[in-house]
Image (cartoon, rainbow, N blue to C red):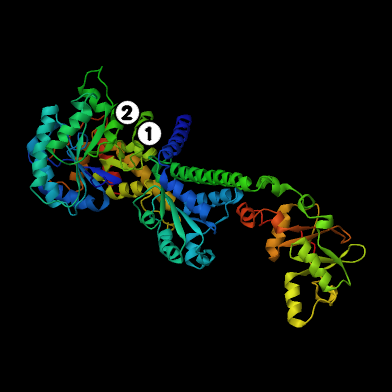
Amino acid sequence: MEYQDPPRGLILDLITPIESGDAIDIGGLQRLLEKVAEHVHGILIASRWAGQGNILSLKVRKQLLEGTMAIAPRALPLFVWITGKDEAETRRNLIALQKVTESRQYDAPIYWVDTPLLYHSNRGLPTLYDELFRLAERPFILVNDPQSVALVRSAIKRKNIRTSILKEMATMDLICGLIFLGSMDRAYNYQKAVRKHSNFRIYDGDEARFLEFPSLSGVVSPGANLAPEKWKIITESSLHLNESASDYPDTMKQLWDTGQFLHELRDFYSSNPPAAIKWALVQTGILEGIYDTEWSGTDEKGIRENLIRLLSQ
Amino acid sequence: MVIEQAKQVLKIEAHGILGLVDKIGPEFKKAVDLILKSKGRVILTGMGKSGLVARKITATLNSTGTPSLFLHPAEAIHGDLGMVTPDDIVLAISNSGNTSEINTILPILKKMGAKIICFTGAPGSPMALASDIVIDVGVEREACPLGLAPTASTTAALAMGDALAVVLINKRRFGKEDFRKFHPGGSLGERLAVKVKEIMLTDNNVPMVETGTSVGKALKEINEKKIGATLVVDGNKRLRGIVTDGDLRRALLDHKEIHNLLVDKIMSPSPKTIGEDQTAAEALAVMELFGITHLVVVDRTNRVKGIAHLHDLLGREEFRLNGISGSAPRVNS
């Protein structure tokens, strides 16, 4: 079976606008989507990173997916995080979220995003995905996130998807990409493993890495919640999405300044992206409810002041 | 930090090129075949850094025997398209495949009849869709922060250009070997290097009559020596003219009876000549330049030493293929 290739470009790692309690702030979600939609090429929802997927209930995940499908100003490819705390919960999430996608017409592709090593070993991964695919016939984007795996798995377990396993899975139609975090050497090996499949995407899951050595599939960016225009400029420049001779004389300087801005911005939210980004979105009026925006930092006040300063530029 | 970053850049570029290895397939072979069969030139085009890569590939192709030239896409729109002929192959380079200047000229080039090959990192791009052959030169990662400049992607395009040039050299070498099977006189390379005196007809094989000879006798000489012409010399074998089949036909139009005319009346007085120490390649270039099939070989005093005929050289197409005919020949007027 053939599926639409995942997009190249800027994938927004959407924060989950969940107010204190267990309900999605639909108004806040709508304002946020209206702000970012024209600048991003896809939206990742309920991720373990900015989306706080590891603490979201299934009810909230369903609300978030349903809300995004209903109110997104334009149909953007959706990347839906399905990983649960174990294999059973992952299957349950998948079935429930599949039902949500079936209940509403959506004109762009939807991909399931999964970090298998959080609940499964490398052995038998292709079989696992054959089974998951039968539950919900949409293609999968894998996540390699050794740091998160290290937090929940035994020290002796592998933290990365084995290159040979990735090579095998890349041959499966239902696996069409990978969000990558990890060392550059591993990035090279993965790239080598999938190079026969020119439409297999390897997105940078690490914004800082993308700003230094951009992957040409794209980046998954929490920062795009705050500065989607600037992230779009850098992503399109890095991926050469719009080559043209009609550059301004100072295009290079503008790109450099934009890149430095994003580096600096990232420095201020990277210690706790969900809390810092939500706090900044509340300050800018995108979110209006009461959010848990406390985060531990050595200089929380300084971080907040700097975020406001940067976002007011 | 500096050392580590520099190493990382080199690793990224190296991996970018290695990534192309598995991408070379039938499309690449089609591109090689298309260029080999073409009677025209390879026209390279690209904007910005891709344009610089295109210029380098142009130079490489030219220096390895594939006539090529660079066409600036913006200049093309303003008139330079006139340099493209239907026999040419266009090789367009754009990593995104979305360069507006290139995508503007491709439909016009197609309409002119030129075949289009593209090097791109986006095989589904507008440029790729407008091309006859798409060669994927995509890399997974750039080495330049913020996308300020294409790095690994341009390196990859450059390397693919080198691959194309080298394959073309080797394919043509193969052609020469094939050619040798049918021409025991030696390989083309050897033939190119020889001097005219080594391949020219000499002594009694040279058709030659003295001034004052009748056309009838000249006709007999032409028939016997079988190269369609005879030289006219003085008593010291100094060249005075040539009588060719064409001269005879023109004489027949002007005179009812030509047998008793003197050759002096109908000969062409200034035949093209060449020195015996010049190369076969130069001789062929002169023949091609003037559209003639033989050259008189003379010494410094214009004394005839022999005659070089096209049939004694290798085929013209083979010479042209190797870019020899473009060199400036020394011609004795």
Q: Say which residue appears at 66% left-offset and 57% top-offset.
A: B326
Q: Does A139 sit above or below residue A127?
A: below
- First along the sequence among labels 1 and 2: 2
Nearer-the-camera pick, B62 or A100: B62
Disc 1 crowd, CA 10 A, few/some/many (<14, 14-19, 20+): some
In this rendering, position of residue A293 left or right of residue B274: left
Q: Position of residue B76 (x, y in %)?
A: 49, 64
The quadrant of the image that shows the N terminus of chain A is: top left
Disc 1 secondary structure class: helix
Of residues B306 and A219, which is closer to you in this image?
B306
Image quarter of residue B300: bottom right
Q: Residue at x 72, y 60 (%)?
A: B286
Tell me if mark 2 has few (under 14), some (14-19) or many (20+) residues whose alpha carbon lies within 10 angstroms of its own. Answer: some
Q: Which mark is residue A163?
A: 2
Amino acid residing under circle 2: Thr
Instruction: Give residue A124's position: percent from left, percent from top.
Output: 21, 25
Residues behind callouts 1 and 2 on a single chain: yes
- Report whether B21 appears left or right of A126: right
Residue A286 visible: yes
Q: Are marks 1 and 2 in contact (CB under 8 Å)?
A: yes
Judging by the rendered image, the residue that carries numbered circle 1 is A192
Query: How far is disc 1 from disc 2 in space, using C-alphas?
Result: 9 Å
Q: Secondary structure at mark 2?
A: helix
Can see residue A292? no
Q: What type is the residue that disc 1 sits on?
A: Lys
Residue ID at (19%, 29%): A127
Residue at mark 2: chain: A
The answer to whether A25 is drawn above or below residue A171 in the figure is below
